[in-house]
Amino acid sequence: MEGFPERGKAADLGQLQSTMHSIELACTSIQMHMNSAAAEATILSLSQTPQPYQACKFILENSQVANARFQAAAAIRNAAIREWGFLSSDNKRSMISFCLCFVMQHANSPEGYVQAKVSSVAAQLLKRGWLEFSATDKEAFFYQVNQAVYGIHGVDVQFAGINFLESLVSEFSPSTSSAMGLPREFHEHCRKSLELDHLKTFYCWARDAALSVTNRIIESDSAIPEVKVCTAAFRLMLQILNWEFSTTAFADGVKQGSDSPKRSECNLVQPGPAWRDVLVTGGHIGWLLSLYGALRQKFSCEGYWLDCPIAVAARKLIVQFCSLTGTVFLSDNVQMHEHHLLELLSGIIQWIDPPDAVSKAIECGKSESEMLDGCRALLSIATVTTPSVFDQLLKSTRPYGTLTLLCVLMSEVVKNLMTNNSEEETWSWEARDILLDTWTALLVPINRSGGNALLPAEGKNATASLFALIVQAELKAASASAFKDDDSDYLQASIVALDERLSSYALIARAAIDVTIPLLTRLFTERFERLNQGRGIIDPTETLEELYSLLLITGHVIADEGEGETPLIPNAIQIHFPQNLEAENHPLVILCSSIIRFAEKSLEPEMRASVFSPRLMEAVIWFIARWSCTYLMSREENRERNSRNILLKFFGEHNQGKFVLDIIVRISLTALMSYPGEKDLQALTCFQLLNALVQQKHICVHLVALDSWRDLANAFANEKTLFLLNTAHQRSLSQTLVHSASGLRNSEASNLYVRDLMGHMATYLVEMSSKSDFKSIAQQPDIILPVSCLLERLRGAASASEPRTQKAIYELGFSVMNPVLVLLEVYKHESAVVYLILKFVVSWVDGQISYLEAQETAIVVNFCMSLLQLYSSNNIGKISISLSTSLLTEAKTEKYKDLRALLQLLSSLCSKDLVDFSSDSTATHATNISQVVYFGLHIVTPLLSLDLLKYPKFCNDYFSLLSHLLEVYPETVAQLNGEAFSHVLGTLDFGLHHQDVEIVDMCLRALRALASYHYVETSAGKVGLGSHAAGLKDPGGNFKEGILSRFLRSVLQLLLFEDYSPDLVSSAADALLPLILCEQSLYQRLGSELIERQANATLKSRLTNALQCLTSANQLSSTLDRKNYQVFRKNLNSFLIDVRGFLRTM
């Protein structure tokens, strides 16, 4: 092949030796940290040299420096991928053959990483040519590999052959493939082809390789080379089982994987019926279990063996077989899958049973790895079976079911955790997480479906005992943490951090709900009574910590998290209690009533002082918030008499609901008023409890009628204590109170409620800003604090705007327009206040703009213009270069926040043209929003900098707005002056080379809009973008080309010579087509330059044809319709595949 001659001239030999010496010296320099930059440049030059194959081959075959050989292999890969388009078929095949032969010939080399690199290069090159090579070519390569894997050339070559297949499978798998600069479709075609034609064959080769060496391994008493072959074969088999198979259909009766969150990995194996003979019916599982069992027995006295590579690889493969599911099993033969799982469980059970003996052995020094793999196997089995099938598996060989084993195993782990209450994570921590995931896999479907797959009685009893032990362990941990002065994990763990584990506990409890609810009631009552009996006598700290823990556990057991939806009563609670119970005797009513009565005690000052610590109140508020979403005044109740309706009716609006709602509001007010400085408690009260109540209109109807709610509103308006809340909490409270207006009888009453609630706050701002001495007193802390609080409250009210309160909130904002401008002027050097002003205006405009009539819209728009002008004229956001580094960073952050708020304001204004509910939205005197937004952009852009665009959120907001404006209003782009226009286009150029694919995509859409607008306008005889597109002379007399010419160059440069995501090709095509149509002469000139730069006559002809096809193939025309865009996308894909590789070598 070219570059790989069999022998060269003497002069060539000298040059090759010189190149090898340079690379060796560079590698040595890097290792010695000497002149690293120059050394890296030398190595890079080898990869970038056109056709460096002869030099790379020479280095691989002759260099004594392993790193030099590694770099030579990397250079072959990089050059071949880059130049693939103009290499001959013989060259390509010869290169792959050379790499394969090198790997086999040097199979016993001590530098394994070099072998792995060359093997990887061979795999990547084989994939690159996969769709070109004939079946005969592929068979020739694989014959060589097959001979190696079967051990014909010795153990070392056998190991090398298996490693090559591992590299090959990795390259063809989408999640681990290497980038080649090719469309996603190429990788997908390769994946499908390998899966259909070769993957099963590779698996059989690996299996046979392992079979060929197992006898020698079992018979040998020492480490032999065959061990590494068997380990590599197991690894390859595991890798193939982890393949993302196309055939994902499930057989009838087979459970699909749960979508619940898991701490442990469990990948389903679904290869389809074609694999049945290999994986299921061929005795493969029995052989694997026998091999592991024999080795385990042989080395039972050697503690290290459980963690040696062959043992680990074998166990991983066994665990993965537990996840086998789908159509690989006969759909009309359920016993086939059950027999498969039973066979596996029979071999695995010795890893985990008896649990007490296994736990004791681990505590005495035995490795825990086998036990943990046994737990993972149970998780895999649970993921692919129903609870009843899972339980029955073990009953064929034991007097108890698998559920009982799972309970005993989990109990042993929990006992170990109780005994070794260490803050360091131990094996029992990991085992607990895996086993909790197992319970989740088993019980989530039951919890969702409600009883279609109930646990058997034996399993239910064992589950109840397990939950009792879990609660005992949690209470013991809580009690032990009561007097710890250190930052123990338990004491510091937040409710959110505990949530995942407690959710799994809840599933276990619900599996035996008729036993666990009375248990929780008894435990809670005992501790409540203990507090009452020991008041003033016994230190209650331990009991309070236990109550805290019980509240969290109980809240998870009886209710699910809403996550934006109203959660239903858990199915287990609905169906597992007798339907003829009186409400007062229902176990859940008894439990919930006990907790509510306990929580009500916090209203008593004496009890609050002695019992209800801030930490316990957090748990109380959290519990009430979670409980009320499900049970309080639910609209789901009906006339049927069942457990569900008994509960809903008892806490409904016609029974205890209003009474409990009043208690909840009074507890909330107490939490806000009586615990100053407790931010976590106040956050739970504002964000979770109160906010959840007002999300349901039928509850709001009762809320606004309560004296306690009026007390809350009055305290919000007048109590100084609530002005000391965190400003975010004040905003949330304001939003909640305004939301509650939806419960009033009509729009007039709602608007009056909002005016009464917020009016005096607006009046205060008006009066304050009107004072003659306001500028002189404005900087005083006792002035800044109420101003900041009122701005946050106004923002909260504005964000709660809805149609029935829109009028009052508009009036509220209208009344403070002038004060806001005064505040912006007075506090121009107080960045925190400026930010609050901007965020209030953003919220107000966003909530109002869609409802405003033309006259009101004009008022709001003029106000926003004044705000923007004032912000700009005060040079707010400008950064002094004299600031220290820390102050400079802080100033940049403040500027980022301000400008992001301004961008959000412009986006809110922009939404008027998309969503408009006003009655005169089509009136001729309606304000032109696009002109206003461009005016705002004109003001804001001078304050932008490329440094600010490095903030991800700001960058996304900016380009989202810019893309929207240029797509929807391209005709107004010429209204920007030259400086602002250049600034905007400069940021567009920055975004075009951004690392975030979404940002680049938005910029390409913007370019498409600009170019399309100009092309359509000029085709109709209009000016389009005018001088911005035509170009102009700068002050120095030099001609500056137009923006379309500039971006035509940029997009072509990106597509042909730079790295980018394949996902961007379609967007780039859509931008490139109108750019070419607008600048056809420039496109022709750029194409000619590319052709002239190509020295190779063959490649020059190929490039000429490709450029011609790009703009003419598939009947491409000069129109900008949908069909033409689709044709051009197809043409561009073909063009890039054809020429991008060799163009990047120029």
Image (spheres, helix red, strand yellow):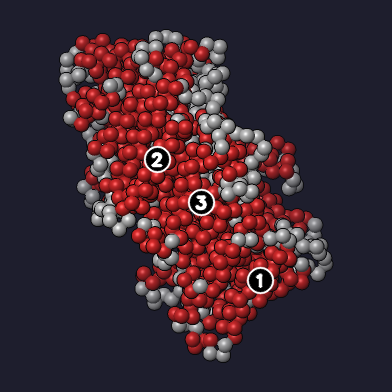
Q: Position of residue 468 (x, y in %)?
A: 36, 34
Does the rendering let one see residue 834? no
Q: CA distance from mark 1 to mark 2?
A: 49 Å
Q: Is residue 209 left or right of residue 913?
A: left
Up-down: is 317 above or below 1104? Answer: above
Amino acid at dot 3: Ala
Label 1 sits on a secondary structure element that is helix
Residue 365 rendering spot, x and y as whole percentages: 18, 30
- Give the mark, 3 or 2, whose residue is nearer the N terminus: 2
Q: Tell me the crowding category of disc 1: few under 14, some 14 to 19, or many 20 or more residues within 10 angstroms, Cα based.
A: many
**SS for dot 2:** helix
SS at mark 3? helix
Which numbered marker is on residue 522? Answer: 2
For the N terminus, the quadrant is: top left
Check residue 755 in the rendering and tell me which mark sits there, or answer none.
1
Asked whether 417 or 1011 is in front, the reply is: 417
Visible residue check, residue 260: yes
Please state the horizontal and vertical placement of residue 1116, each as a whole percent of the image. Answer: 72, 41
In the picture of the structure, the residue carrying the numbered disc 3 is: 625
Amino acid type of the residue that numbered disc 1 sits on in the rendered structure: Arg
Image side of residue 1022 versus residue 648, left or right: right
Q: Residue at x 23, y 24 (%)?
A: 357
Q: Earlier in the sequence, mark 1 or mark 3?
A: 3
Extreme-front residue of the structure: 533
